[in-house]
Image: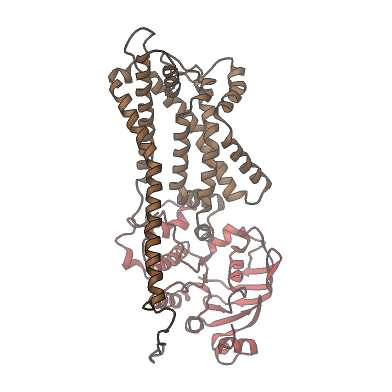
Amino acid sequence: MSTQPIPIPPARPGPMNLQSRGMRINTARRTITNHIVSGLAILATLVVLAPLAAILFYLVYKGASSLNLAFFTHVPAPVGETGGGMANSILGSGVILFVASLMGIPVGIAAGVYLAEFGRGKMLANAMRFTADVLNGVPSIVMGIAIYSLVVMPQKHFSALAGGIVLAIMMIPTVTRTTEEMLSTVPRAIREAALGLGVPKWRTVLSVSLRTASPGIITGCMLAFARVAGETAPLLFTAFGNQFWSFKLNEPIAALPLQIFVYAISPYDEWHRLAWAGSLVLIVLIMVSVTLVRIYANRGVLKGGS
Amino acid sequence: MGVGILVENLNAWYGTNHILQDINLHIPANHATALIGPSGCGKSTFVRCLNRMHETNPVARATGVVKMGDLDIYNDASPVEIRRRVGMVFQRPNPFPTMSIYDNVASGLKLNGFRNRRILDETVERSLKQAALWDEVKDDLKKKSGASISGGQQQRMCIARALAVDPEVLLMDEPASALDPVSTSKIEDLIFQLKSQYTIVIVTHNMQQAARVAENTGFFLNGKMVEFDSTHKIFTNPRDKRTEDYITGRFG
């Protein structure tokens, strides 16, 4: 290393001089523009949040008063009797969503991994991507009819399993596409680090790419879960609904959205109130399960990691 | 211990772009060899051919013979096997962000199914000491993410990670180009110490760096190797006019 002093070039005069009059006007205008754009962004956020908050408040206002212990422990009361609850529907929704997640999430993630890691530029991958996007746009009632003829008809009866299958199929496109998107945000440098250590490709995908992308993939799964948790139409033809307890996968089963639908279109005030309560419970349960998954996924995240 | 590398008629392409043309070279064992040349001349592609990283790009291909000792790396072994024996340090530090410092260093072993805790602990400590990082991180090994330490520390961690799998050859693709002068000098000291045990190939844009760490230097230009000789010869009395022009800063 030389110890000679390094000559420092003088600062450039001219255009960079902020004291000149033209520059000062420009600065004022920029500041105003900045405030206007920030204001618009905040306004847009409020416009988005307002309906959400309104729905939530309205649900609490209409539904909270009908909530009691019986709601969570009793099956629906027969017509003409008061009381009763939606315990069987809460359990039924849980069963259907569990079955749907168990089938839809692994398949969706696996397909996303194929698209991002193995299928770049391949015909099959392009076909899959296109199918997933189309599937995402298919109306849920059409899904219901399709599974009705593919699963319910051959079995000759409605079932929780058929409900799980239809929701799983609805989850797959969202899970697949988010998995693909999230994997493609993992820098190539990180994959190369693993490959360069002599880690086989499958292991690199599993332990490095998927793990690095996992927060985004989990968000995608939760979005898909929350979306199908409230689906009613496809369950009409598959899970069908049930006024009593059902613990078997091959029997018709109750579900919160179905029960809400039945109660909401009924002529009885008592049932209308229960429908509101059911809606509130459905939303709260979705929020709770999404939050629990996030807390569970965030355990063990290291200081300064991502 | 390191092992020498013999390269015969190596050609490499990206799509139809002929990146490397008829490279012939002998890289001696347990020495540092520097590769210099202007951007885009094929230096990086060349080192990526030595551990078969080149072929991870779907449009890339290579022909020719590369021998590590007696092993023909393109015919006698799988890429995965080769990469375990030929470690690589990249231009930018590339820690695994989801892993702790400990797991980053142990990753080469752990991701290949190695589970013995005692040996993992020993290997992590040895590698971090070799990379002159142990004292700085020993208290947060399992607490901090590998991405949370400074850039210079990350790069030394990446060197430790490469050393942990006990390679025979260490390829370094501009390992200090993203670092400040203090970190750079630490990395150079490191190369100086490591070259007694490993065969080191270092790509660099910094000619003083080549002169400081390497016994031999190769000059690449437009996909060809113009000259390969002892570093002293290259920098004082090059045979080729183009080498002289480059090292005296007349182009590039």
| Residue closer to the observer: A118 or A86 | A86
- Residue at x 63%, y 42% (from the top left corner): A130
Q: Position of residue B58 (x, y in %)?
A: 64, 57
Q: Which chain is red?
A: B
In which image quadrant can residue A230 be found?
A: top left
In which image quadrant can residue A219 be found?
A: top left
Q: How is the image coloured?
A: by chain
- In this rendering, does residue A145 appear at all? yes
- Residue at x 43%, y 51% (from the top left corner): B115
- Residue at x 52%, y 55% (from the top left corner): A199
Q: Position of residue B237 (x, y in %)?
A: 59, 92
- Residue at x 55%, y 38% (from the top left corner): A173
Q: Position of residue B133 (x, y in %)?
A: 36, 68
Name the quadrant of the C terminus of chain A: bottom left
Q: Is residue B119 left or right of residue A140?
A: left
Q: Which chain is brown?
A: A
